[in-house]
Image (cartoon, helix red, strand yellow):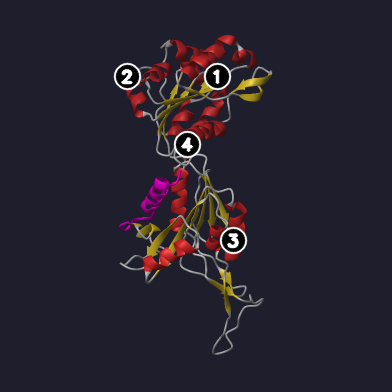
Amino acid sequence: MSFLSGKNVILGISGGIAAYKSPLIVRLLKKRNCNVRVIMTPSAKDFVSPLTLSTLSENDVLSTFTSDDENNKTWNNHVSVAKWADLFIIAPATSNTISSMVSAKCDNLLIATYLSCTMDVYIAPSMDLDMYENAANQNNIDSLVKLGKKVLPVGTGYLASGLEGKGRMLEAEEIIQYIENDLSKNLPLHGKKVLITAGPTYESIDPIRFIGNRSSGKMGFELAKRAAELGSQVFLFSGPTSLDINNSSIEIIRVNNSDEMLEKVMMRYDKMDIVISAAAISDFKSKKILSNKIKKKEKSLNLEFVPTKDILEHMGKRKKNQFLLGFALETENEIENSLLKLKNKNLNAIVLNSFNNDNLVFGSEDNKVTYIRSKNDITHFNMKSKRLVAVDIFNQILSEYA
């Protein structure tokens, strides 16, 4: 999920050649689950079709103070549009539009809406080389920055005039990425790296069969989503599962068995700030993986199993400054066993899953957990969705992690 998800966004488009990039900006915002309203200056319509923008945004495009319907004139209320929005993007912002923004020259609907807004404004300049470097334009850009507006850098390259240099508007993807990065700066985990393990591991017996468990990976994936929402870069190590996440802040590393999980996790572990071991790692594996499929010839079959390497124990022994959170699934002596694991594996805290009280855990959309820091610091939570459990867990982490 993007930091832009669910936000109401105004895209202002002024009359410059870079307006051809504006439809892609709308498309990228819609893919991030934004509600988008487009306002164009009259000259912008010479560069890009309002019909295209209306189709992509799923809203009427505004350009004048009144509607174009001669038989039923209505006022396009710039004040209500400004109050509706969570943020305002002006791309492209031409020299004329930037000058009007600084001087409050309110001669079109775009500037009127800009002057009425109180939310964050992101401005993507678009000019020719000499125009961009002109002292008057640089003074205007500096004035917008001093007013608290967020002026994006310009790109360097081939310009519409035939010149080559600074002044071109950033590409649509770069604009969206800049805004997402900026929105994350004030989040509590901005700049932090979070490693999360999720799902089961499958330990092969022969080319067809394996031993594993019923873990769906849902809890780990919800934790990854929440970590990203809080501004962190997330590395999600997932065992075999059908789950997926489309989020630029989350890198999913797929593994099959416990040895793969251990190897890949420990390659990243030392550079992490927070580590959450939510995967249901198999405790045993076959001592020997058979090269051929086992045939049902004998009345009984004996297989020898050996313990898998304890990934959480490895992380605890190598812990330096990481906040290390483990998970425990117990069927008896829950608190006592969890406290023992907390101590023996050098954890900062442990989350107890329980099979008691009709708590399904595996495959369920809900979970009931207990967050344990020590014998005298235990927090019990009611049954709730795994999404909300992830919120609870990170609230606990943030209360002690700095």
**Amino acid carrying mark 3 in the image:** Leu
For the residues labelled 1 and 2, the Cα–Cα distance comes to: 26 Å
In the image, the segment drawn in magenta is 379-402
Badge number at residue 184? 4
Q: Which callout, 3 or 1, points to the residue nearer the camera?
A: 3
Q: Which of pointers 1 and 2 lies earlier in the amino acid sequence?
A: 1
Q: Which callout, 3 or 4, points to the residue nearer the camera?
A: 3
Task: Residue at 50%, 43% (x, y): give it.
Answer: 232
Nearer-the-camera pick, 375 or 94:
375
Nearer-the-camera pick, 57 or 156:
156
**Amino acid carrying mark 4 in the image:** Ser
Q: Check residue 384 for magenta coloring.
A: yes
Residue neighbourhood size for the residue with mark 1, other residues' Cα within 10 Å, grouped as few (<14), some (14–19), many (≥20):
many
Mark 2 — residue? 75
Picture quarter containing residue 284? bottom right
Mark 1 — residue? 16
In the drawing, does residue 336 fall left or right of residue 287?
A: left
- Residue 270: x, y in percent? 59, 51
Q: Which of pointers 3 and 1 lies earlier in the amino acid sequence?
A: 1
**Amino acid carrying mark 2 in the image:** Trp
Q: Which callout, 4 or 2, points to the residue nearer the camera?
A: 4
**Amino acid carrying mark 1 in the image:** Gly
Picture quarter containing residue 121? top left
Task: Residue at 56%, 26% (x, y): give it.
Answer: 20
The residue lying furthest to the bottom in this view is 299
